[in-house]
Image (cartoon, rainbow, N blue to C red):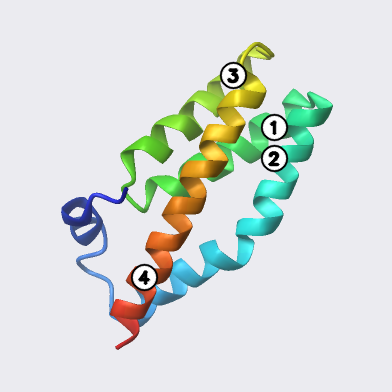
Amino acid sequence: MIDRQKFNENFQYFEKDVIVEIIDIFISEYEDRFNNLRQNVVDRDFIKLKFNAHSLKGVIANFMDPVTIELSKKLDEMAKEKREAGLTELFADLEKNSEKLLEELKQYRLEYST
C-alpha cells in the first residue's frame, strides 16, 4: 500500500501531468518487466535477474509502497548472492504486491488526471 504522505512529498514539486506520465511509464512497462523477471527466476539467470530486480527496485522506490520496496530489495539481494532457496516464493510475493501497487497507481492516475 502506498504511503500517501510520502508519495505526495516525493512528487511535491512535479506538475500533475508529469506525475501522470511517470505512472503511465510504470504501467506501460509493467507486463514486460515482470515477464522478464519471471523468466529470469525460472532460468535461474542471476546476472539478468540482478539487473532487472535492481531496475525494478529503483522504479518502485519512487511510489513509496514500503512492502513492495522491501520485497524488491530482497529479490535484488538474492540475485546478487545467487541464492535459490525461497526465490520463487519471494518473486510470487513481489508480483502479488506489485499488482496491488499497479491498481493503486491506476487510481492515483485518475485523481491526478482530473
Q: Which amino acid is tagged 1?
A: Leu
CB within 8 Å, label 2 to label 1: yes
Badge 4 is on which residue?
107
N-terminal of the pair, mark 3 or mark 4, is: 3
Residue 93 image position (x, y, % from top left):
52, 33
What is the crowding at mark 2: few (fewer than 14 residues within 10 Å), some, or many (at least 20)? many
Q: Residue at horizontal 65%, vertical 12%?
A: 83
What is the crowding at mark 4: few (fewer than 14 residues within 10 Å), some, or many (at least 20)? few
Q: Which amino acid is tagged 3?
A: Met
Report the mark closest to the observer, 4 or 2: 4
Residue pushed farthest right?
Answer: 43
Relative placement, left or right, of 8 versus 55 is: left
> Which quarter of the figure is the C terminus placed in?
bottom left
Badge 3 is on which residue?
78
Q: Which amino acid is tagged 2?
A: Leu
Task: Identify the secondary structure beneath mark 3.
Answer: helix
Q: Residue at horizontal 43%, vertical 69%?
A: 106
Badge 2 is on which residue?
37
Residue 10 image position (x, y, % from top left):
25, 56
Q: CA distance from mark 3 to mark 4?
A: 32 Å
Camera-nearest residue between 54 and 112: 112
Q: CA distance from mark 3 to mark 2?
A: 13 Å
Task: Identify the secondary structure beneath mark 4.
Answer: helix
Relative placement, left or right, of 42 versus 105 is: right
Q: Residue at horizontal 16%, vertical 54%?
A: 5
Q: CA distance from mark 4 to mark 1?
A: 29 Å
N-terminal of the pair, mark 3 or mark 2, is: 2
Badge 1 is on which residue?
49
Q: Is residue 17 above or below residue 62?
A: below
Q: CA distance from mark 2 to mark 1?
A: 6 Å
CB within 8 Å, label 1 to label 3: no
